[in-house]
Image (spheres, rainbow, N blue to C red):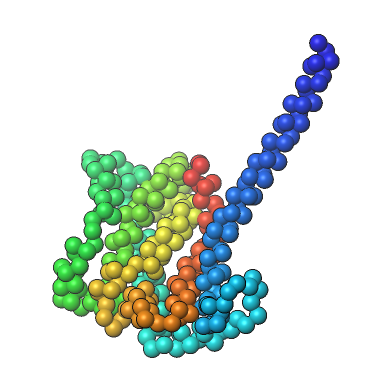
Amino acid sequence: MTATTSEVQPATAARSMTLPSARRLLLWTGMAVLFAWVLVPIYFVALGAFGGRLGVFRWPKSIWPSDVSFAPMMQFLAIEGVFNALLNSLIAAGLTVVFSILLGAPAGYALARYAFRGQNAYRLLVLLTRAFPLAILALPLTVSFIRLGLYDTPFGVSLIHTVLALPFAALVTQSLFMGIPREYEEAAWVFGCTRFQAFWKVVMPLALPGLAATAIFAFVISWNEVFAASILTVRERTLTAYLLKILAESPLHYRFAGGFILILPSVLFIFAVRKYLFAVWGIASK
C-alpha cells in the first residue's frame, strides 16, 4: 500500500508540472497563429505595393524580395487627387476621434454614475442607432448639408462618422467608468476636490486605456467608411471614396498601393496608443 502511494505521488507531481508547460505552449501557438493571420496579408499587400507590376505577377513569391522599391508607391501618390484625399481622410478621422470622445465619454459617465428613469431604454436606443440604415438618410443628409454649407467638406464627413462611432463610444465608456470605483472620487471630494477636479485628476488617468480603445474604434470606422463619404463629397473626397472611384480600372499594383495606404495609418495609430491598451484589462477587472 505504501509502495503504491509513493508511485502515485511522483506521477501526480509530473503531471502538475507539465500542465503549465502545455498551457504556455498553447498560448504561444495561438499568438503565433494570430500574428501570422494579421501580418501575412499585410506583408503580401506591401509586396504588391512596393514591387510594382513585376512584383505583383511574379510567382512564386519570394519571402525576401530583392527588387522592392519606393518608386511604385511614389508613382501612386503622384496621381492627381490621392494626396489630397489622404489628407481629407486624416482630418475626418481625427475629428471623429475627438468628437466621439468628447460626446461619448460624458454620456458613458452619466450612464455609469447616475440612475434615472428610462436608463435602460436610453441605452437600448443608443445601440439601435447602429441598426438604422444610413442609405435611407442619404438624400435628406445631402440636402441638409448643402443648406448648412457642410457638403463636400471633411468636417461634414466627420459629423456623420461621429454618429456611427458614438453608440460604441458611449457604451464602452459606460462599462469603463463602472469598473472604476466611485470611492476614488468620494475620497478626492473629501480632500477638497470639486466634482470636475476629481473626475479629471482621479478618474481620467484610470480611464485612459479604455478611451484609447474607443479612439481606435472611432478612427477605424471613419478611416474605412466609404458610403457616406461618397455621397457627401464630390471634390474633397476621402481616400476610400476616391480610391473606389479611380481604382476600378487601374493597374493591379496601384490597387495594392491603395490598399497598403489604407492599412498603414490604422496600424500606426494603434501602435501610437498601445501603452494605454496594455492596461485596459487590468481596469476592467477592478
Q: Nearer the viewer, residue 33 or 92?
A: 33
**Most extreme residue toward the right, as rendered?**
3
The answer to whether 28 is drawn above or below residue 160 in the figure is: above
Q: Nearer the viewer, residue 44 or 90?
A: 44
**Where is residue 44, by image quadrant?**
bottom right
**Most extreme residue toward the top, as rendered?**
1
Say which residue appears at 15% left-offset and 76% top-offset. Answer: 147
Residue 284 is situated, as x and y percent measured from the top left of the image, at 48, 45
Say which residue appears at 56% left-offset and 55% top-offset. Answer: 34
Q: Nearer the viewer, residue 122 or 64?
A: 64
Please indicate, yes or no, whether residue 84 appears anywhere in the rendered image: no
Residue 253 is situated, as x and y percent measured from the top left of the image, at 48, 80
Q: Quadrant of the N terminus?
A: top right
Count the labels in the image: 0
Is 3 positioned to the left or the right of 259 in the image?
right
Q: Nearer the viewer, residue 281 or 23?
A: 23
**Most extreme residue toward the front, as rendered?**
59
Is 79 positioned to the left or the right of 235 in the image?
right
**Where is residue 136, by image quadrant?**
bottom left
Please indicate, yes or no, whether residue 165 appears anywhere in the rendered image: yes
Residue 108 is situated, as x and y percent measured from the top left of the image, at 35, 50
Residue 282 is situated, as x and y percent measured from the top left of the image, at 54, 46
Say which residue appears at 31% left-offset and 60% top-offset. Answer: 164
Say which residue appears at 77% left-offset and 21% top-offset. Answer: 8
